[in-house]
Image (cartoon, rainbow, N blue to C red):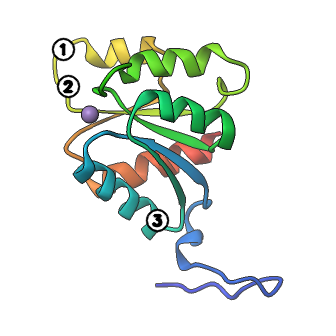
Amino acid sequence: MIVLQPRCGTPCRPASRWHEMASILVVEDNPDNMTLAVFLLESVGHTVITATNAEAGLTSARAERPALILMDIQLPGMDGLAAIAQLKAQDATRNIPVIALTALAMKGDEERIREAGCDGYIAKPIRYQELLAAVAARLASS
Ligand code: MN
């Protein structure tokens, strides 16, 4: 592992070697999936904001303006697709990239998710390399 020397006297995390640290909102109602996502994202230096339903996620997105949102599709009450549509319909949040997290595997789902305005798609179960690669790619292109 390459450990970068701190510049400007600030602590430097090795993970910043290959991506930017960012504030990421995770909207996920399954506790195990949430724990895993938070662990993976924090392990590479990101700051994670959590919400366990769409309404709380929309509130956090507006208030915190995260650099990226990971949105579960199957949520209690408002589902992730409806939440993404709301994010993309509002000036304050439309430019925040959204990666969908979904266990849905039916043909046509990816298209449906992209039509809702999603910027990417990760099928569950969460695999750590796939998740971190998708996050890094999305942050690098925004
Ligand atoms: Mn869910």
Left or right for 52, reference 36: right
Q: For this rendering, which residue is in front, 80 or 100?
A: 80
134 left or right of 49? Answer: left
In this rendering, the answer to whether 134 lies above or below 95 is below
**Residue behind mark 1:** 107
- What residue type is disc 3 on? Glu
Residue 17 position in % (x across, y down):
58, 71
| Quarter of the rendered structure image containing ligand 1 | top left
Spot occupied by residue 98 in the image (x, y as percentages of width and height): 50, 32
Check the picture and name the quadrant holding the C terminus: top right
Q: Are marks 1 and 2 in contact (CB under 8 Å)?
A: no
Measure the C-alpha gap from mark 1 to mark 2: 9 Å
Query: In the image, what residue occupies the spot 45% across and 14% down?
Result: 116
> How much space separates mark 3 and mark 1, taking CA atoms?
33 Å
Q: Earlier in the sequence, mark 3 or mark 1?
A: 3
Residue underneath mark 2 = 104
SS state under label 1? loop
The picture places residue 9, in percent across and down from the top left corner, at 79, 87
Which element type, helix, strand or loop, lies under badge 3?
helix
Numbered label attached to residue 42: 3
Mark 2 or 3, nearer chain start: 3
Pick the residue in front: 30 or 18: 30
- Quarter-wise, where is residue 90 in the image? top right
Q: In front of the other: label 3 or label 1?
A: 3
The residue lying at 30 percent from left, 39 percent from top is 29
